[in-house]
Amino acid sequence: MSRSERAARRWALGALAVALLLLPLSPNAYVVTVVTLAAMSAALASAWNIVGGYAGLLSVGDAAYFGIGAYVMGLLWLKAGVSPTVGLLLGALTSMVFGLIVGTLGFKSGLRGIYFAVATLAVSEIVRMVALSLDVIGGNMGLEIPYVSSPRHLLFRSEIPAYYLILGFLALVVLISARIRRSRLGYVLMAVREREAAAEALGVDTFRCKMTAVAISAFLVGLGGGLYALYSHYLNPTFYFSLDVVVKMILGTILGGKGTVLGPVLGAATLSGLEEGIQFIPLATARAASLSRIVYAALIIVVVLFMPRGIVDLARRGRWRRPVAALDAPVEERLTAPVQRTTDEHTLR
Amino acid sequence: MPDLPVVWQALVSGILMGGIYALVAAGFTLIFGVLKIMNFAYGEFVMLGMYATFLAYTLGGVDPYLSLALVLPAFFLLGIVVQRLLIDRILDAPDDMQMILTFGLLILISNLALFFFTSDLQGIRVGYLDRIITFGGTFFRSSLLYAFVWALGLLAATYLFIRRSRLGRAVRATADDRFAARVVGLPVRAVFWITFGLGSAIGAASGSILLPYLPASPDRGFEFTLLAIIVVVLGGMGSFVGALVGGLAIGLTRSLGQVFISAVLSDALSLFVVLVILLVRPAGLFGAKVARDVAI
């Protein structure tokens, strides 16, 4: 990237930041809601990207971190009167510890790929089912965080302070993600993604790096859960522990560009905006909701099939990239493709 | 502490449900074994099978089991179409791409069903399937016994096809090593189509035979996928016998769990068992060998 390009990018980011900060001045309150939700999904996708994108570990259990962060914060406030200022942190730490437990079990037993995915999915489903059947924490009905105005406890009647909190959260996640990307940790994580055995052969403690990544990611997702609970004033297991939460994180990341810093932000924000936008397609039926989900799902399929490297890659190249080379060929051709010989083999003969 | 008759009742209905779970899992394990794809949209085919039978009964008065003659070929073809249009393209893609694609399919199908059928429960009442059968002090609806018998029949038919027919042997060879299968001249691509079609047809058929017992609703799909994953991990990924044993084990766990703890917590318990198995013995209880993606 040249110097002028970098300056242009800095100006663009600055302008975006100012626009976001001034947004609540807009007479249309709905715009703030849309941007709040978009910023929240962007931050969550970025946090997922640290494990799922950089390290390529397919974690499907992040809804558990999200829900735990939210519930710990909410319960501490409702049942013990612990201020959400402290509760947010405690919730995020609990998520982190939980993530470390899941990580230890998963990595020590060598689970990979889809098996790691199934294990993390099982964990988050167990947590959801337990939360559903615990009446102490509201069970199926959930819990409400009463609307009181108490800035000291980060509780507000209005939406706008929560909007700034969530923007701040997004900035924090993006900064951390960018730092990791350029740090030793980031390089190790990417090495794990490309070829873990090789990294280990070089003497890198990949286990420790994976655990660090999971800890950071789970902490951030847990923090996001707590902030979302403060924003929505409502806690229920069907939403917080749902697969939807994590599918959105993964899809936002893939749509934007896995393993990049800005990709997940762009992808998740786009997705979130689309989801809101589709609801405006005039359809005077109660079926509009399912129709918007149909469009959403079709989009998922199109993205995976035709732009698996995401928006960022598309923007960088300025053209559509064909799907991963080998995928284009029909199965039969791929199976019969000649094996590439290295030159060594020839010289040896 | 529940008394003995209650436990006996739970045991009998657990075995009956377990046979049906085994059929649900059979299609999933077939697809996973051959294509190495974890098809999260699988349960949607079960759900669609329920609706197909529902429509056949309400619109044409077709007996739910007779409707299998329609459902099996229809979903075999639908499966082939899905395989050609979508799955074929992602066979070599990274795990997360495969997963998110089948998730997309899951959301797509369940919302299409929601769009067309609304979220109301849709069941059917057929005279001979609505009786109460008593057996050794236990009682259950006749639809459950019929579903169990049909499930075992379809399982046996699939097993014979896989084990005894030439095509079945091609399917097994492809599952073992698709490259080697290609080298000896098997039409691997066609085998993939047939496998996905067959797996989808089995899933839809399990929905059909369940319908008289369990009403259909658009959001049931993921329950079935989760069930199939639990059963298949328990029995061993891609293992057919494992699906049967796993199905019975989960059927028993669920119905006994309902008696001793609660329905939701017993599901959590089976997921916990799955987790432990994944961590300790990833090949499952009956898996012949450790799956390739696990460990080094």
Image: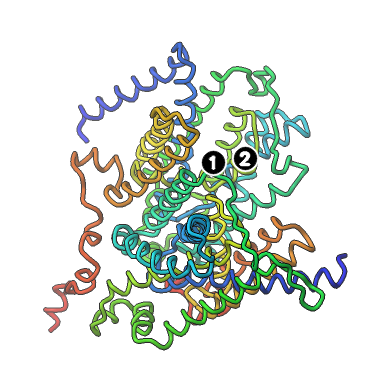
Q: Disc 1 marks which amino acid?
A: Val
Query: Is the residue under label 1 in contact with that under label 2 (CB below 8 Å)?
Result: yes
For the N terminus of chain B, give its image quadrant.
bottom right
- Frontmost residue, A32 versus B75: B75
What residue is disc 2 on? Answer: A69
Please give the label number shown on residue A46.
Answer: none
Q: Which mark is residue A221?
A: 1
Report the residue at 56% width, 74% height from top. B151
Q: Residue at x 38, y 53 (%)?
A: B101
Seen from the viewer's position, the closer of residues B4 and A51 is: B4
State how far apart marks 2 and 1 are (Cα). Answer: 8 Å
Q: A57 or A122, which lies in front?
A: A122
Q: Is any part of residue A259 visible from this angle?
A: no
Q: Earlier in the sequence, mark 2 or mark 1?
A: 2
Q: Residues within 10 Å of mark 1 (few under 14, many from 20)?
A: many
Q: Nearer the viewer, residue A90 or B112?
A: B112
Q: Is residue A214 above or below residue B180?
A: above
In the rendered view, how is the structure colored?
A: rainbow
Q: Are marks 2 and 1 on the same chain?
A: yes
